[in-house]
Image (spheres, helix red, strand yellow):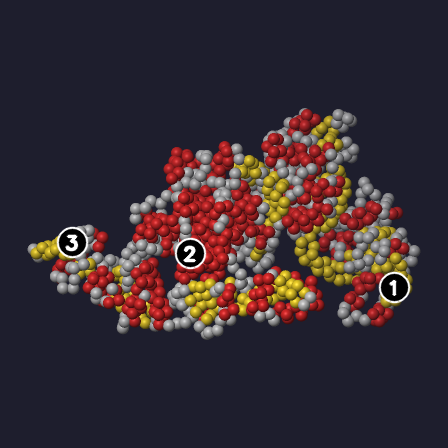
């Protein structure tokens, strides 16, 4: 086990784990074990993505969140069905085919035939499913791709029909005109939430045009618009009924205009500038008349274009109406109305009788956004390209008053990337407004992370929800199951394949248009032939039906669905607030008056490092597969989850951040794990078999053992609490902090102890075993606990840790894939139950004492750095002064934890200053909490602040002791004062610093005398030896002899003065001058180093026998060939040289080491 590499290639390790999971069907077995146990079901819905594109960081992020939560549930005693799904219909697919076949308008599809077109669509819907499966699996996500669902499956589509029929029968379905966002690129209306997906800043013409009044053509109303192409369809002008309007004479043109008084600046831009002076107005215009908007209602005007002036309904056109939607923050206060191209325009014109419900609306635009032949000057021109021509026509006809450019945010189609227009189209609607209040109430029953997305963004969207247009005039989608006569006066809604067969006599196996459009129904009422209407469902209707359709409800799995509905958990990005989250909620409320889900995590957007949207064209982000290949999926998972993006904020993706996870978390964690295995192996080589013992763990008296166990139990408790609240963003930082505590503190503080190097041999081995028992216990707990978060590295660790469990033998012959599950026996960490926390081990006082130790050590190191004192050089004393500390903490850091402070700060002494002595060391100052007291004291705050800051140390101590401060007529609670300690001990030898909240000050005595400097040099020599051992590849158990060579005797004096330090570290040995090394000693490695300004050659040698100086040279040659470990235990060596027998006695003729010889012969006095 110690053969684990010093550096682990995390990515390659993960690939081997992936292969292991696949070969052993680990995911399938986790489910099997759960079902066998009868675990309660945890329902999870996975929103179906399109497989027409490759997965990106947004998908990886959402997938990681979903996998983490569902793994947690599965390891917490739940059965979790995790089934992949694919969104196969709709614009994303059609758009790809339109590009491929160069289709630009609807007629081309009809010419080639719907059957051929849909066959093309079907051919690409699973284009990238294998790539998705590869990436998702490589990320460690367990989800069932073999038993996936597709929205094109007949079973799925049939359930969608059932959903729609339920709404139809509840009278929640109707057909009507509605002005909707319309994609001319895709020739279809799109939903409002789709319209919000792709806004861009654009420059549009902004013009002011005039509309002369019929009763006085010398006077004209002025209207402002950024869509000149809608003016040929103008049918009315709208004013605000309560605004003040003026008739003015324009001094420059001598023309009379009417506009809102507050919007004169639209005509005269100088009025909106800072230097504008009101007296200049008379140079520009003269107000001739003032009136309220309602006084203008009914006035008729001459339209700019007369294309609709002589139609059957035109007698109601071209008049002024009023509505309060008109604003005065832009424009002229007069809004031109084209009901075919504006939602408010349509509503206002309908309300004022300009147009009539059920009748056609003047609309000179075809499905492709081109002007029809009616508008001769721009026929066959796309609306957005017709502006310049129309503006020139208006200018030539004297109707253009001003022309400008406006830079503003404009919606584009998220698929074709073409500008959207708003267009009145016949659509099928769900009457969302009828049950909107119920949707709002059901939203209140759900739990969102973060909550503000639910309470603000989603709630506001719901309270203003409009009827939902669910139809699309397209081809590749689930056909709307309405069969009707030509004028829609007779309709039948079909809810199943069986019902269609019953009414038509035709059994179908597929439900796409090429099949069902051929099916007719003979009306039982009239005998007329009913044909299916032309439209298909918006793909959002299908994804909103996913909870029912994935299970083919209600035709199958009825009991299972009803038992697991609403879902326990879903997760997607913030953009789904108006997408999937909304459609799920609408349909579940309409069907069952329930929310579709109980718990929801909303993630934010992953941006490129430069803060821009990730772009393949710009190549401003690293390929996810390359990032996984370089750093591993676990690192990417942890980086994403431990970021603001998990609480619906944005993340600027930085590859360095993923590397940071590897360096700061995984490498230290791996090193601690490898260190554990190395020392267990060392212990077992010495004859002590390691068998995990909870009894030894619970029985330890070592303060750091008790602390790390308490910290582990605290972490377990915290993770369960936070995961039950779906707060991943609090869990990951806690896990990262814990790994730091384990590796940087526990393992480092106990390194020598765990190596068996603390105390005498038997005591040292016992201490090492207890420490290793504790380390094993916490490593196993944390490995299991982190399983849902970092599934690969935890599996890797578990496969090693399980081998020590007595139950490991039970894994044979399929036992590892059977119940009951427990560490050792079970083949995967992911089969195990997450550990519960042990209340009895939550030792808060020990945890607090360790926190104090860490604070003291960190401040002590800061002080050393300020004085440029290396940690190798000891200091005489470290003192800690606390403002307010419990006796338990003082007992801990001056008792069992003191030795760690002495070691970490390399100090000869450590003391905590008592309260009675603090005035000699620090000054306590108080500062008012301005945030709290400022509101309460008002003008008295300044005097209060001065009085508080003037308090002496003793005064401040008294205030804190009494809990209040009385200033004349004011009584201030001590809790509203901010205390801070400042070091005030006299003497240049002291260096001090304090933690930010002022509750602790640490000082070090920086006196540097001969003894201190000598001890520092001793540390440098020890470090040189350790470096040589590491470079030589030696293990802990490998014994060497150490020699040094110098000019003079400074280092020998250092060794002599610090002999105890060396003998403790080197198990009774000590470095010797090079002259005491035998000539046959084998040097493993040597290096010249600088110690205290002197050049010293340090060598480590393989242990060898040392001989008496005057021993026969040939006998010495014999001794040089003998291995120390092979020498007889009877302390006698016999040999024959040149026919002469020699009997050599240990400690007389030879010694087992150079230091033994030097000690016996007293060749250096400082060794005895």
Residue at numbered disc 2: 896
Upstream in sequence: badge 1 or badge 2:
1
Secondary structure beneath label 2: loop
Question: Mark 1 packing: few (<14 Cα in 10 Å), some, or many (20+)?
Answer: many
Image quarter for residue 120?
Answer: top right
Vertical relation: 1116 (above or below) 539: below
Upstream in sequence: badge 3 or badge 2:
2
Q: Position of residue 418 (x, y in %)?
A: 67, 51
Horizontal side of 182 relative to 766 (left or right) equals: right
Vertical relation: 761 (above or below) 923: above
Q: Position of residue 179 (x, y in %)?
A: 75, 46
Frontmost residue, 433 versus 291:
433
Question: Mark 2 packing: few (<14 Cα in 10 Å), some, or many (20+)?
Answer: few
User: In the image, what residue occupies the spot 54% across and 38% down?
Assistant: 78
Give the Cα separation between the discs numbered 3 and 2: 46 Å
Give the Cα separation between the discs numbered 1 and 2: 92 Å
Residue at numbered disc 3: 1132
Secondary structure beneath label 1: strand
Q: Is residue 376 visible?
A: no
User: In the image, what residue occupies the spot 35% across and 63% down?
Assistant: 1023
Nearer the viewer's eye, disc 1 or disc 3? 3
Give the Cα separation between the discs numbered 1 and 3: 127 Å
Frontmost residue, 109 versus 617:
617
Residue at numbered disc 1: 248
Frontmost residue, 684 versus 145:
684
Horizontal side of 215 relative to 612 (left or right) equals: right
Tell me whether the residue at label 1 lies in contact with that at label 2, contact meaning CB atoms closer than 8 angstroms.
no
């Amino acid at each position: 086990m110690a053969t684990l590499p010093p550096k682990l290639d995390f990515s390659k390790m993960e690939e081997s784990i992936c292969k292991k999971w696949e070969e052993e069907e680990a995911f399938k077995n986790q489910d099997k074990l759960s079902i066998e146990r009868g675990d309660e079901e945890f329902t999870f819905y996975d929103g179906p993505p399109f497989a027409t594109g490759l997965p990106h960081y947004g998908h990886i992020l959402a997938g990681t969140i979903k996998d983490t939560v569902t793994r947690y549930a599965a390891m917490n005693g739940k059965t979790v069905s995790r089934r992949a799904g694919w969104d196969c219909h709709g614009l994303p697919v059609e758009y790809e085919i339109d590009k491929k076949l160069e289709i630009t308008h609807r007629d081309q599809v009809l010419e080639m035939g719907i059957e051929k077109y849909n066959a093309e669509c079907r051919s690409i819907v699973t284009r990238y499913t294998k790539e998705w499966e590869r990436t998702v699996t490589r990320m460690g996500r367990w989800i069932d791709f073999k038993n996936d669902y597709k929205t094109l499956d007949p079973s799925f589509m049939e359930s969608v029909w059932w959903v729609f029929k339920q709404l139809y029968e509840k009278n929640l379905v109707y057909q009507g005109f509605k002005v909707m966002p319309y994609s001319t690129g895709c020739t279809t209306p799109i939903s409002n939430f789709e319209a919000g997906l792709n806004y861009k800043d654009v420059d549009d013409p902004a013009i002011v045009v005039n509309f002369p009044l019929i009763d006085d053509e010398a006077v004209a109303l002025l209207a402002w618009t950024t869509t000149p192409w809608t003016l040929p369809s103008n049918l009315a002008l709208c004013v605000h009924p309560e605004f003040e309007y003026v008739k003015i004479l324009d001094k420059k043109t001598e023309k009379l205009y009417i506009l809102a008084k507050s919007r004169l600046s639209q005509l005269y831009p100088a009025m909106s500038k800072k230097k504008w002076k009101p007296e200049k107005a008379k140079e520009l215009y003269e107000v001739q008349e003032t009136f309220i908007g309602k006084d203008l209602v009914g006035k008729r005007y001459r339209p700019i274009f007369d294309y609709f002036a002589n139609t059957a309904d035109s007698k109601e056109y071209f008049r002024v109406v009023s509505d309060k939607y008109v604003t005065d923050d832009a424009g002229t206060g007069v809004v031109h109305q084209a009901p075919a191209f504006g939602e408010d325009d349509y509503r206002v014109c309908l309300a004022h009788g300009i147009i009539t419900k059920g009748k056609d609306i003047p609309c000179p635009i075809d499905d492709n956004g081109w002007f029809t032949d009616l508008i001769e000057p721009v026929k066959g021109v796309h609306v957005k390209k017709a502006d310049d021509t129309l503006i020139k026509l208006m200018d030539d006809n004297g109707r253009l008053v001003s022309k400008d450019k406006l830079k503003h945010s404009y919606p584009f189609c998220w698929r074709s990337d073409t500008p959207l227009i708003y267009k009145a189209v016949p659509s099928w609607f769900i009457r969302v407004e009828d049950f909107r209040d119920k949707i709002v109430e059901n939203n209140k029953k759900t739990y969102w992370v973060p909550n503000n997305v639910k309470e603000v963004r989603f709630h506001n969207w719901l309270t203003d929800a409009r009827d939902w247009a669910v139809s699309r005039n397209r081809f590749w989608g689930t056909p709307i199951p309405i069969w009707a006569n030509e004028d829609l006066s007779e309709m039948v809604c079909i809810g199943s394949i069986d019902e269609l067969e019953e009414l038509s006599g035709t059994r179908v196996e597929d439900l796409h248009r090429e099949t069902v459009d051929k099916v007719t129904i003979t009306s039982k009422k009239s005998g007329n032939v009913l044909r299916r209407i032309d439209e298909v469902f918006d793909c959002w209707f299908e994804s909103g039906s996913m909870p029912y359709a994935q299970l083919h409800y209600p035709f199958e799995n009825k009991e299972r669905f009803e038992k697991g509905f609403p879902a326990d958990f879903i997760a997607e990005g913030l953009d789904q607030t108006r997408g999937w989250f909304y459609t799920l909620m609408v349909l579940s409320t309409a069907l069952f008056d329930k929310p579709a889900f109980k718990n929801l995590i909303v993630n934010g957007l992953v941006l490129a490092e430069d803060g821009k949207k990730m772009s393949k064209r710009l190549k401003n982000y690293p390929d996810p597969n390359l990032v996984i290949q370089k750093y591993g999926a676990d690192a990417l998972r942890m980086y994403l989850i431990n970021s603001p993006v998990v609480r619906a904020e944005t993340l600027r993706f930085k590859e360095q951040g993923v590397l940071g996870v590897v360096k700061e978390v995984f490498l230290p964690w791996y090193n601690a794990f490898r260190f554990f295995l190395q020392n267990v192996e060392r212990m077992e080589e010495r004859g002590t078999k390691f068998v995990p013992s909870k009894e030894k763990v619970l029985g330890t008296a070592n303060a750091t053992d008790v602390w790390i166990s308490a910290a582990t139990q605290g972490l377990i408790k915290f993770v369960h609490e936070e995961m039950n609240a779906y707060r991943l963003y609090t869990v990951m930082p806690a896990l990262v902090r814990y790994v730091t505590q384990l590796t940087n503190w526990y393992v480092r503080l106990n390194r020598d102890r765990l190596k068996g190097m603390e105390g005498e041999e038997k005591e040292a081995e016992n201490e090492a075993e207890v420490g290793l028992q504790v380390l094993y216990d916490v490593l196993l707990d944390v490995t299991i606990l982190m399983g849902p978060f970092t599934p690969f590295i935890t599996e890797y660790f578990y496969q090693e840790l399980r081998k020590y469990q007595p139950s490991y033998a039970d894994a044979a012959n399929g036992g590892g894939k059977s119940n009951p599950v427990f560490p050792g026996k079970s083949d995967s960490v992911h089969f195990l139950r997450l550990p519960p926390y042990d209340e009895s081990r939550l030792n808060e006082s020990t945890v607090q004492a360790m926190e104090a130790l860490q604070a003291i050590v960190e401040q002590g190191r800061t002080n050393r750095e300020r004085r440029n004192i290396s940690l190798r050089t000891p200091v005489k004393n470290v003192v800690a002064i606390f403002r307010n500390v419990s006796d338990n903490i003082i007992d801990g850091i001056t008792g069992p934890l003191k030795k760690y402070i002495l070691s970490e700060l390399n100090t000869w002494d450590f003391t905590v200053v008592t309260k009675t002595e603090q005035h000699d060391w620090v000054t306590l100052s108080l500062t008012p909490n301005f945030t709290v007291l400022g509101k309460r004291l008002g003008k008295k705050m300044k005097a209060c602040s001065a009085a508080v800051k003037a308090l002496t140390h003793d005064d401040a101590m008294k205030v804190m002791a009494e809990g209040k401060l009385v200033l004349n007529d004011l009584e201030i609670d001590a809790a509203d004062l901010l205390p801070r300690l400042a070091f005030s001990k006299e003497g240049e030898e002291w260096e001090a610093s304090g933690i930010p909240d002022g509750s602790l000050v640490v000082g070090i005595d920086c006196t540097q005398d001969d003894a201190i400097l000598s001890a520092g040099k001793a540390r440098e020599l020890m470090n040189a030896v350790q470096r040589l051992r590491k470079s030589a590849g030696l293990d802990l158990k490998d014994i060497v002899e150490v020699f040094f060579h110098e000019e003079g005797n400074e280092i020998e004096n250092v060794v002599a003065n610090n002999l105890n330090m060396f003998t403790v570290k080197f198990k009774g040995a000590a470095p010797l001058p090079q002259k005491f090394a035998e000539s046959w000693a084998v040097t493993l490695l040597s290096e010249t180093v600088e110690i205290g300004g002197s050049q010293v050659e340090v060598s480590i040698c393989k242990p060898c026998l040392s001989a008496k100086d005057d021993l026969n040279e040939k006998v010495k040659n014999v001794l040089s060939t003998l291995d120390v470990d092979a020498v007889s235990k009877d302390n006698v060596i016999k040999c024959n040289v040149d026919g002469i027998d020699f009997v050599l006695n240990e400690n007389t003729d030879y010694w087992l080491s150079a230091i033994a010889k030097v000690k016996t012969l007293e060749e250096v006095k400082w060794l005895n």
